[in-house]
Image: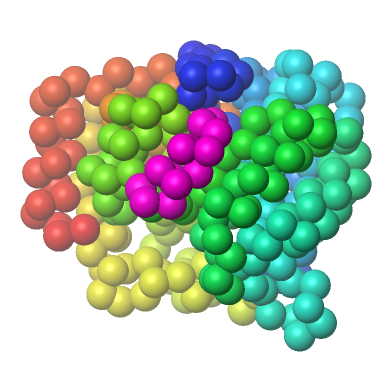
Amino acid sequence: MRQRRLGVHGPNISVIGLGTWGFGGAGGFGLGAVDDQESIATIRHAVESGINWVDTAAVYGLGHSEEVVGRALAPFKIGDTVYIFTKGGQNWSGGTGAMVRDLRPESIRSECEQSLKRLGVERIDLYQFHWPDAIGTAVEDSWATMIELIDQGKVRWGGVSNFDVSLLARCHMIRPVDSEQVPLSLINRASATSVIPWCRANGIGVIVYAPLATGLLTGTFDRARIANLPDDDGRRRLARFQEPQLSRTLGFVDHLRPMANRLGVSAATLAIAWTLVTPGVTGAIVGARTPVQVDGWLSASDIQLSKEGLAQIDAAIVETGV
C-alpha cells in the first residue's frame, strides 16, 4: 500500500488507516454490540494487508476500543511496523455519566496514563486532542501539556482533531503540530477549502475521518436497513441519518454506483479514493467490523481518478444537492 509522510517530522503511514470506533461496542459512545474476537481478527487482518496504523480514542466504548486495539496489536512491533494513534480530551470521569470536552492539563495527563494502560504500551505513537476544550481552558496550556508528554517519552508525536485554523495556529506557534484530524467525505467537504489547505501550507499532516459518512457512502444502506438499526447504534443520532440529509445522500449514492462499476470497484472504494486525491490529505481513516469489510475497500489506495471522473462526481454533487 502507498505511504505518505505525516507532516514534516512524523512517520510514513499507509494512505489508509483502520478506524476502531465500531469496536467500542454498545456501551458509551458506541455503534452497537460487537464481537471482540472478530474485532481483533479484523485489526490483525488490516495490519497483515499493509495498513500500518490504527486509530482509536479513549471515549470509544468508554475505553473498550483501546483495550481491544491493545490486545489485537500485542503480537506486532508497535511503534515500528504498526503505529497506534489515539485521542483524549473527552472526560467522562466526573460521576455524572456525561462527557465533557476537557483539555485541562491535569485531565490530559490523567487520560494519557489511562490510555497507556488500556493499550498496554509505554508510549503512544500519535496522541491527539479529540475536540477543542469546552470549559474555558487556554489552548496554550493544553498544548504545553502535550509537549510535556512528548518530552517525558509517553507520546511520540502530538496532534489535534477538529481544531479550526485559529486554534491550530496558536498551538503551532509554541511547537509544530504533527497532524490534524478532520472530517472529509463526498457529503462533507468543508475542510477541503479551509483547514486542510492551511495545514498543507504549514507542514502539518492531515488525517481525514468518516470518508464513508459512517457507512452511508458504502452503497449498502437503504431506508429499511437504517430504520432497523439497533437502538444502541450511535448512528441513529447523527444528522446525516435524518431528513432532509438522508434523502439527498441516498440519491447521490445512486449516482455513485455506476461510476464505481465502470472502474470495477465498490462505491465505498470510490468514495475513499476521492478523499485521497484531495491536496494536503496524508491518509484516511476507514472503519470496518470484519476482515471481509477491510478487503472491500483496501484497493482505494491504488485507484487513480481521472479529471473526467472527478468532473462526473462534481456534477452528481450539484445535481443531488448533497
Magenta span main SS: helix
**Residue at 64% across, 66% down:** 102
x and y, in percent, of residue 205 in the image: 46, 29
In the image: residue 41, left or right of residue 191: right
Residue sitting nearer the eye, 176 or 155: 176
Mark yes or no: residue 147 visible: yes
In the displayed structure, 39 sits above or below 58; it is: above
In the image: residue 184, left or right of residue 138: left
Question: Which residue is outermost to the bottom?
Answer: 96
**Residue at 81% across, 34% down:** 152
Residue sitting nearer the eye, 269 or 74: 74
- Which span of residues is magenta-colored? 165-178
x and y, in percent, of residue 116 in the image: 85, 44
In the displayed structure, 67 sits above or below 321; it is: above
**Residue at 31% across, 36% down:** 198
Residue 77, located in which quarter of the rendered image?
top right
Residue 250, located in which quarter of the rendered image?
bottom left
In the image: residue 169, left or right of residue 158: left
Residue 314, located in which quarter of the rendered image?
top left
x and y, in percent, of residue 269 in the image: 41, 33
- Assign the C terminus to one quadrant of the image: bottom left
In the image: residue 276, left or right of residue 100: left
* Residue 303 is one of the magenta-drawn residues: no
In the displayed structure, 103 sits above or below 136; it is: above
Count of numbered marks: 0
